Image (cartoon, rainbow, N blue to C red):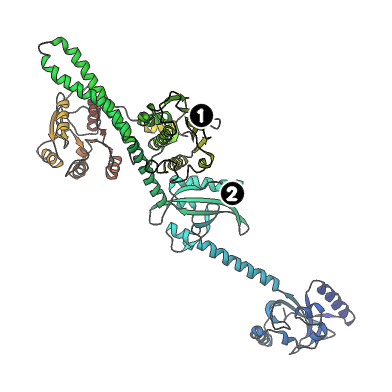
Amino acid sequence: MSGSSPKSLPPELAREVLDAIANTADGGSLGVLVTTSVDPPEIVFANAALAALFGYGLDEFLTLPILSHAHPEAAHDVEERKQRKRRGEQLESRFTTWARRKDGTRLPIEVTTNPVDIGGKPSNVTFLYDLSERYRTEEALAASETRFRTVVESAPDGVTILRGATIVYVNRLGARMLGYADPRHAIGRGVADLMSPSDAQKAAQRIGELFRTGARYSEPAEYKSRHVDGREITVEISSIPIEYDGLPAVLAFARDITERKAIQEKLVQADRLAAVGTLAAGIAHEINNPLAYVQLGLQYLERELPKLAQDPGRLDDIVARLREVRSGAERVGTIVRDLKTFARADEVARGPVDLRAAIEAALKIADNEIRHRARLVRDYEDVPPVDGNAARIEQVFLNLLVNATHALSDVVSDTNEIRVSLRTDAGGFVVAEVIDNGSGIPTDVLGRVFDPFFTTKPVGVGTGLGLPICRSIVQAFGGQIDLLSAFGDGTTARVTLPVYARVGDRAQEERPRPLSSRPPDNRGRVLVVDDEPLVASLLRRMLAPQHDVLVATSGQEALRALDEGTFDAIVCDVMMPGMTGMDLYSTLRQRDPALSERIVFMTGGAFMPRVAEFLSRVDNPKLEKPFDLDTLRLALRQVTGRGGGNGLPRPVT
């Protein structure tokens, strides 16, 4: 500090010390200046490096007053230091300021000054260091940071930097994606706070892997993220390991794909409905066959039953015809159930899927297409359940089977063949293949088959969405789909799916509770509600041997019956004009909650979102039409076992 005691140098050593310092400083481009402590100070010594720093030769520099080298921008600072020194304040020995070069340009310098005693005179030794390079570096760094922020803030994606699982930087779009108006409000938040519980652990595991290995993932990951207002959004995130502020970090690019997923869901559903429409003729053929002998059988029974009294020996023949009629009706019901499973919209649930059963379900729908054009060969090995959704996987294989069929010659030939195989590969994945021996795919076309809307089929026949949607479905389940083909040598569509990891646990969770099948021992009162009189009347006749049954053909009529009497159970259709079964349930929830729990719902298929949501929410038994009498009886025991009914038996426990 300038207020410290000056160090006295003997005159004989002073020049040697100054020369040594000057020589050293010249080599390092460090300016050395010795001045008297008078005001204004006089130059006692200056080295060549100092003169060069200001753009002068040494001789010229020594002729100029030292304060003439101060830049006008620093004049205020120079005057302030003078005033502080006069007041006896301690001044900093090191400070930065602006000097002026010979050409008038500014020179940023760092000044270090200390008082000494030279030849008995108080003096100051000052070292001056050129800060130009440092300033240029800092300005370049500031400009680089400005450019970085400009680019990042203009990016079409949310950009986040994570240290561990904590956000240390997020751009404005990323903050808005999460619902924060100010990015600072998202800083310090953990990944687990921003994602749905189902995905938080998966994200943390992926981030940990990036920190641990430094490897980059080739594919982005999809997560369910939580908006500040509670909404759930779907984001697609690509992450890479980086260094940030000298420490390991993860740079994540997030894109909100909620709308894209919604559109994709609609395309998936549209593709499914288009496939069903394409195969409508085949389905009609499948239904018409059993329907033909159902109708013929009923006509035969209508004609022959009146004769039974005169010829009791024909009873066995009558019973046999009844069994045929029932078999035909059950076959129609099976076809309808397969179609409903395939076309239903509520298919987001994932779990263990029997791949063999899913393929067989697709084969049933495509059977009319295949059997008139090719021989079908099955080559199944025993495989474990895969992780996925049965309806969506059925859609994938229906698409592949139809494509394989269309690849074959229209000319019926014994050589046309479609082979379906199923196996487990060395990596533990389940592999299913649909192989045709058709014309194959040209090389220039093969690379584009998964492009949306690309199709080689005539206008009106193909949309170009089938294979892209198949790939989207398979990839969503963690699998892969490949098309292997050579022109003139057939095509193999290979689907690889991961094995379901928790089959045992999930199977135990989802196993339905066994219900008693013992015959009823007490009569009860049952209200049947269905707007279709023939269905309601038949149910009454079927239940009459065991129970007292009252029929209502509307929700309003059912409420009047409930006002006039008590019932042990209600069998109610979900969809009816006016007051629906859902409305009746809501009314009873207010009037008689116990009775609302004893409703057995009948449905012809939950195609409307409102109906699907309702049926998924209530715990009451649901019967899909058509159903048999034993199933109905078991459902009645189930609801009355919950409490309240005094006429129907409870399940055996």
Could you say where residue 277 lies in the image, as x and y percent from the top left?
Answer: 32, 38
Q: Nearer the viewer, residue 629 or 25?
A: 629
Judged by depth in the image, the label closer to the viewer, 2 or 1, is: 1
At 37% from the left edge and 43% from the top edge, which residue is drawn?
460
The amino acid at mark 1 is: Thr
Q: Nearer the viewer, residue 527 or 624?
A: 624
Residue 396 vs residue 40: left or right? left
Could you say where residue 222 lies in the image, as x and y percent from the top left?
Answer: 47, 47
In the image, which disc is placed on residue 168? none
The amino acid at mark 2 is: Phe
At 28% from the left edge and 38% from the top edge, which residue is drawn?
619
Q: Quadrant of residue 613?
A: top left
SS at mark 2? helix
Could you say where residue 311 lies in the image, as x and y percent from the top left?
Answer: 12, 10
Q: Could you tell which of marks 2 and 1 lies nearer the N-terminus? A: 2
Outermost residue, right direction? Answer: 12
At 49% from the left edge and 52% from the top edge, which residue is drawn?
191
Crowding at dot 2, Cα within 10 Å, few <14 / some 14-19 / many 20+, comes out as some
In the image, which disc is placed on residue 424? 1
Q: Nearer the viewer, residue 28 or 41?
A: 28
Q: Which residue corresponds to mark 2?
A: 211
SS at mark 1? strand
Judge whether 29 appears above or below 419 on screen.
Answer: below
Residue 12 visible, this angle: yes
Q: CA distance from mark 2 to mark 1?
A: 33 Å
